[in-house]
Amino acid sequence: MQQNKKVFILGSEGTGWSIDKDRQYTIQAIESIDGFEITKNIFKANIIYAIWWDRLTNTKFKVFNTIFKKKVVAAITSDLSHQEDKIKSLQSYVDIFVYANSKQKNKLLELGINKDNLYFNPFYVDEKIFKKLLISKEEMCDKFRIDYNKIKEKILIGSFQRDSLGSDLSKPKWQKDPDILIEIMRKLDKEIFILLLVGPRRHYIVNQCRKYDIEYIFIGDSSYIDNNLDDIDVNALSIENMPYLYNLIDIYIVSSKSEGGPKAIPESVLCGINILSTDVGFAKDLLDKEFIYNNSDEAILKINNINNESTIKSNIDKYYSFHLFSQRIENILKAVIK
């Protein structure tokens, strides 16, 4: 009887958020595939599957794989436009690159990666968790201790991504570009629109809201923001809470300059919520062009159109199911051991 090929999963964050969920779903998928099994011992592995590709650039790993020559799969989790040198450094020992969007694929081809070594598998978002909820906004407000009267007859705009640098919470993460979201909110009627902010490291955007008198609600312990303390271990909500927040809002806005996803796009669409996004990550792969904006003035026009029409157009059904995710991983694993 042929022995199962052993797969070691490389990469974790320890917060239970994005990367950790990628790890969880990848393990779950591999455990369902005949001929493969998970190992926690990297030395016993036949395949190293890096769900956080940056971990492969570590000098210790390079030395390890020079000696042990494992098969290596690198899942690309970010925008590569400013990381060309890192990718080039991986070419000699990564067997398969997994891309999540067409921008990543095009950049990998541009950098000389053989198309036969490229496999598509977008970040999985659990469609059993992220879905339209049949409960009232009043009930959702009660769940998060929000005064329903504050949002009643208002349009709630959501932003759930970290926007502040971990090393200096007073400064924005350039990748997330929170300034364009602030610009949009300043141009909207504050008698009508409220910004709902969730999650840790929202210091920069909360302080900008205070500075410009923007109506906002922050879910979490704001004393960490008041005292400029890191709240990464305090204000992170569980993934299971997020669908309630998506269902509470009317529009989600992605303002990023650089993304591998973001997962907020499929999460919003699966919850039946309208979304506007900059042209990052897989935005153009998943969304109709009318839901993509280039500047704050364009965003304002599209927000008004959304209010009048409110029908999200998306290709999400072509990408998201656990069956498809697992099937793609099976194809990747079988290809890497050929």
Image: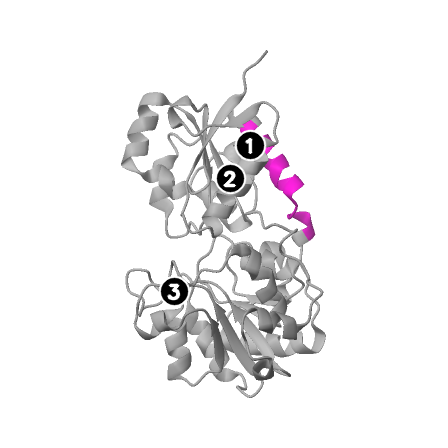
Q: Quarter of the image holding residue 251?
A: bottom right
Where does residue 303 sit, x and y in percent of width and height? 60, 76
Main secondary structure of the magenta stretch: helix
| Residue 237 in magenta stretch | no
Q: First in sequence: mark 2 or mark 3? A: 2
Q: Amino acid under label 2?
A: Val
Where does residue 241 sit, x and y in percent of width and height? 56, 60
Could you give the CA–CA distance between mark 1 and mark 2, rounded to whole angstroms?
8 Å
- Is 199 displayed left or right of 84 in the figure? right
Residue bearing the label numbered 3: 201
Residue drawn at (37%, 83%) of the image: 211
Q: Nearer the viewer, mark 2 or mark 3?
A: 3
Q: Secondary structure at mark 3?
A: loop
- Is 239 displayed left or right of 235 in the figure? right
Give the numbered dot on residue 98. 2
Q: Nearer the viewer, residue 38 or 327?
A: 38
Give the numbered dot on residue 332. 1
- What stretch of residues is rendered in magenta? 317-333
